[in-house]
Image (tube, rainbow, N blue to C red):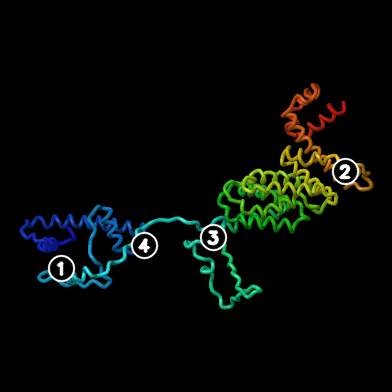
Amino acid sequence: MSIVPKETIEVIAQSIGISNFSPDVAPALATDVEYRVREIMQEAIKCMRHSKRTILTVDDVDSAVKLRNVEPLYGFTSGGPRQFKKAAGHKDLFYVDDKDVEFKDLIEAPLPKTPLDTGVITHWLAIEGVQPAIPENAPIEALAVPSDNKKSEYKEDGLPVDTKLPVKHVLSRELQLYFDKIKELTLSRSDSILFKEALVSLATDSGIHPLVPYFTYFIADEVTRNLNDFSILFALMRVARSLLQNQQIHIEPYLHQLMPSIITCLAAKRLGSRFSDNHWELRSFTANLVASICKRYGHVYHNLQPRVTRTLLHAFLDPTKALPQHYGAIQGLAAFGPSVVRLLILPNLEPYLRLLEPEMQLEKQKNGMKRHEAWRVYGALLCAAGICMYDQLKTFPNLLSPPTRAILKSNKKILTTKPSMTFCYLLNWDLHT
């Protein structure tokens, strides 16, 4: 049985001039009216939910009518409450007493404002962590809580200074715990399996992008504090390499904070406080890291590699620098490839060897550390020159004599893994025979 009474159908039929229809028609029409009303209201509820609201409005019903290709309702709406009156002769029938409107008043009435159509626009909420000053974004000053103790700042000429308040960066609890755990593992001075898994996570996880500024600040701060702790420095460089290997995060805006720390671990005067600290390995590791950064981001920052190369060249040619600094500079330049070696190291090789030779010939009893450092630098020069010579051999293999080519061919595997050996073979077979 329909919830719409048949009497309502009869009243509506009489209002439009239909009075002589069969008694069986009213119940059938009532059932159909109920079905149509339910259909419209279900569509209206869908529109309400898609609009993220919990209150059904007239606009939702109007949208549902349009979706069903039904002619919309026309007329003027009233902002006041509806006044229902009871129909005479029907105890359950009520109607709204419409006010009589003069046609002249209706014509002279001002037109209502045209409603705006619903549309979707896009804008940048933030670009590389910076909120652009556009009308769609609320100004930073509007987001700040006003303070009664705020003091105005003025320049020397009396004009006010515009100070921008910092934007609060909110991290989830999970990211905070993740960051604290990585810090703990990095500073624990242990090469545990858990630390290696953490490095893999830093190199592959795409959800750590909000932590990139925190990691760059952490690396820069800890490198400054722990120049005498070799294990922490090496761990920090491994963390930096993992972050740079992660293709899912955007680390380019933070390279200016990260590069000074990496260059420090490459060309600093002293890394570690004990004689057993293998700072030579740390410098070689960092040299490859610097080369990979310049190779990956050189097309974005065109002056990145020239600036790094200039810094390393000054450290290499400065006689007041310590030999470990020269070693780091040579390794850094050699990591850029044979072209840089041929252009910057080989022209300065002969005068530098004249300065290095006295240090290499020191007796162990007098200054064994100095002699050891000199031979380390000499080995770095051999590797750099070997890289350049090996590149020339691949380009012009007929420059060598047949016996030398036979030796090189028999030791192809060694020369592929250790290009500096090429330089030694050239010296022994072509230059000394």
Please give the residue where the numbered disc 4 appears in the rendered image: 53
**For the residue marked with disc 3, what is the amino acid?**
Gln
Q: Nearer the viewer, residue 157 or 379?
A: 157
The residue wearing badge 2 is: 356
Assess whether mark 4 and mark 3 are in contact (beta carbons under 8 angstroms): no
Q: Residue furthest bottom?
A: 148
Say the numbered circle drawn on residue 131.
3
Instruction: Indicate which label's residue lies in the foreground, 3 or 4.
Output: 3
Q: Secondary structure at mark 3?
A: loop
Q: Earlier in the sequence, mark 3 or mark 2?
A: 3
- At 63% from the left and 75% from the top, the residue drawn is 158
The amino acid marked with disc number 1 is Leu
**Residue 365 shows up from this direction:** yes
Query: Which element carries disc 1, helix, strand or loop?
Result: loop
Across and down, in percent, residue 146 comes to 54, 74
Measure the alpha-carbon separation of dots 3 and 4: 29 Å
Q: Which numbered mark, 4 or 2, is in the foreground of this view?
A: 2
Q: Earlier in the sequence, mark 4 or mark 1?
A: 4
In the image, 192 versus 330, the foreground residue is: 330
* Residue contact at pointers 4 and 2, CB within 8 angstroms: no
Q: Position of residue 373 (x, y in %)?
A: 85, 45
Q: Does the image show residue 97?
A: no
Of the numbered discs 1 and 2, the one sitting upstream in the chain is: 1
Left or right, 200 with reference to 64? right
Q: CA distance from mark 4 to mark 2?
A: 79 Å
Label 3, label 2: how far apart the Cα atoms are = 54 Å
Residue identified by numbered label 1:
93
Quadrant location, the N terminus: bottom left
- Quadrant in the picture for residue 72: bottom left
Looking at the image, residue 387 lies above or below residue 4: above
